[in-house]
Amino acid sequence: MNLTVYCASSNRIADVYVEAAAELGELIGRGGHTLVYGGGRVGLMGVVASAVHEHGGRVFGVIPKALRAIEGVAYEVADDLVETQTMQERKALMFNLAHAFIVLPGGYGTLEELMEVLTLKQLGYHEKALVLVNTASYFDPLLALFEHFYTHRFVSPDTRALFHVAATPAEAMRYVLDYSPPRSGTVRTKWE
Ligand code: AMP
């Protein structure tokens, strides 16, 4: 299974996040899956990628040319490292290759990737599993913001079902492996 993982590029984060990223990488590797991700060796990206490799999985990185040119940023030992011209091209490839999406804690980049996949799913462009790993309740403020959207009817409460929140990487893996799409994919508005 190709698992696209979105996660932090920061190295300056607490150990609890690093441990969860390593655990996810181990589960991906042991399961014989392929990690599809941003191709970095920095932050949680590097942690997940090395753990996948250590446990026998495949690593498929997708990195824009400009980022790869920055010394030390790319995970050069990936099994595949595709260089794209733009961030947009990179996101499209990571999206198209994915059988499921797993989101670990991250910053603006991770949030942007999550929101793109979520809004595309809301509109019926895809029906792939989407799960957030809520390590140390990191995503609670974002989930509270989503509740605010539902309360004020900017977003339909049904859309809560478009993603799953897992407390641990193991729960996230179980979710993606057991997932079956709820309905056949047709593009629709969010209120249908
Ligand atoms: P952030 O959450 O802002 O740290 O951004 C991380 C996300 O954006 C990852 O899932 C990557 O896809 C992408 N990204 C940001 N910075 C880099 C980088 N230096 N190398 C590779 N991917 C990156």
Image (cartoon, rainbow, N blue to C red):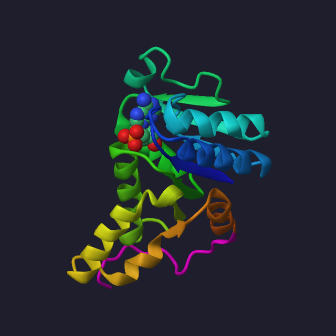
Say left or right for 102 vs 50.
Answer: left
**Magenta residues (range):** 178-192
Q: Is residue 192 above or below residue 50?
A: below
Q: Relative to the observer, which residue lies in front, 129 or 142?
A: 142
Q: Is residue 180 left or right of residue 184?
A: right
Residue in the image at 63% along x and 31% along y: 80
Q: Residue 97, can we see it?
A: no
The reply, left or right, for residue 18 in relation to residue 144 is right
Query: Looking at the image, which residue is at 61% across and 62% down?
Result: 172
Q: Position of residue 41 (x, y in %)?
A: 54, 28
In this view, the residue in front, 36 or 96, is 36
Q: Quick check: which quadrant has ligand 1?
A: top left
Number of dots carrying numbers: 0
Q: Quadrant of the N terminus?
A: bottom right
Q: Is residue 34 above or below residue 99?
A: above
Name which residue lies at 47% across and 65% down.
126
- Camera-nearest residue between 134 and 117: 134
- Say which quadrant the C terminus sits in: bottom left
Residue 78 sits above or below residue 119 on the image? above
Query: Is 57 in the magenta?
Result: no
- Percent x, y for residue 78? 64, 29
Closer to us: 20 or 86:
20
Q: Spot the residue most to the top.
A: 71
Secondary structure mostly seen in the magenta stretch: loop
- Residue 22 in view, yes or no: yes
The stretch drawn in magenta includes residue 191: yes
- Identified at 36% across, 51% down, the residue is 111
Give the x, y percent position of residue 82: 54, 30
| Residue 127 horizontal/vertical position (percent) | 51, 69
